[in-house]
Amino acid sequence: MLVNNAGVFDPPERVSPQGLDTTWAVNVAAPYALTHGLLPCLANGDGGGRVVTTSSISQSSRLPDDFARTLGKPPAASSYSAHRAYSESKWGDRLFAQGLAAHSSDHGSALRSVTMDPGTVNTKMLLAGWGACGISVAAADQTYLLAATAKALEGPNGGYFFGGSGSADARDESKVAALWALLEAQTGRTYPPR
């Protein structure tokens, strides 16, 4: 079991050592790379393993067809929006979960990959970006439901839980494949691990 839950909302524009927007690097590229490294252990777990990746109801609904040329790269300073960077990264998490499910089934793995909106929870990130508009951290249980109960077994592999249907792009195989190719290029890691 792996829960990809780390995330940032980073109002000052920052760039990772690899030249990626920090929000994209932490929220999308890092879960992709971490999951890649742990995949052999996860695939051998009981029932094939489970990966839960936190997305958000705030995910972008769609991105332009040419997103692969610019996504994750720092924008011009005059056009930077922390909210847009966060929304795009949560879109990336949604498509990552869908792509992981597809790659797992393509390679005969029983790995279950799901994603979700954790709810509006008063974390440090929510307080910094939006203010106290959610529930207490102690009351948040959506991650637990997917990680520790049979809830993640409901619906299709790659499914999105608790936040409506998520981005329509998650059902567009060409966009999932384009995101996957972008993450391979950004991290230098290809699936399945060799």
Image: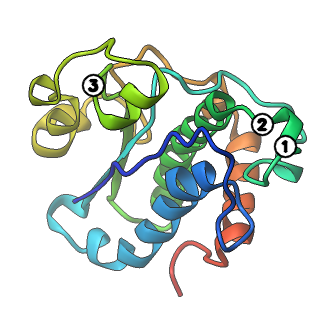
The answer to whether mark 1 and mark 2 are in CB contact below 8 A is: yes
Q: Which structural element holds mark 1?
A: helix
On residue 125, the disc is none
Q: Nearer the viewer, mark 1 or mark 3?
A: 1
The residue to which callout 2 is attached is 80
Q: CA distance from mark 1 to mark 2?
A: 5 Å
Farthest-out residue, bottom: 194
The residue to which callout 1 is attached is 77
The residue to which callout 3 is attached is 122
Q: Position of residue 139 (x, y in %)?
A: 11, 23
For residue 166, side relative to residue 122 (left or right): right
Q: Position of residue 97 (x, y in %)?
A: 48, 46
Residue 160 appearing in the image: no
Say what amino acid the circle numbered 3 marks: Asn
Q: Position of residue 14 (x, y in %)?
A: 66, 54
Q: CA distance from mark 1 to mark 3?
A: 29 Å
Residue for point 85% across, 31% down: 64
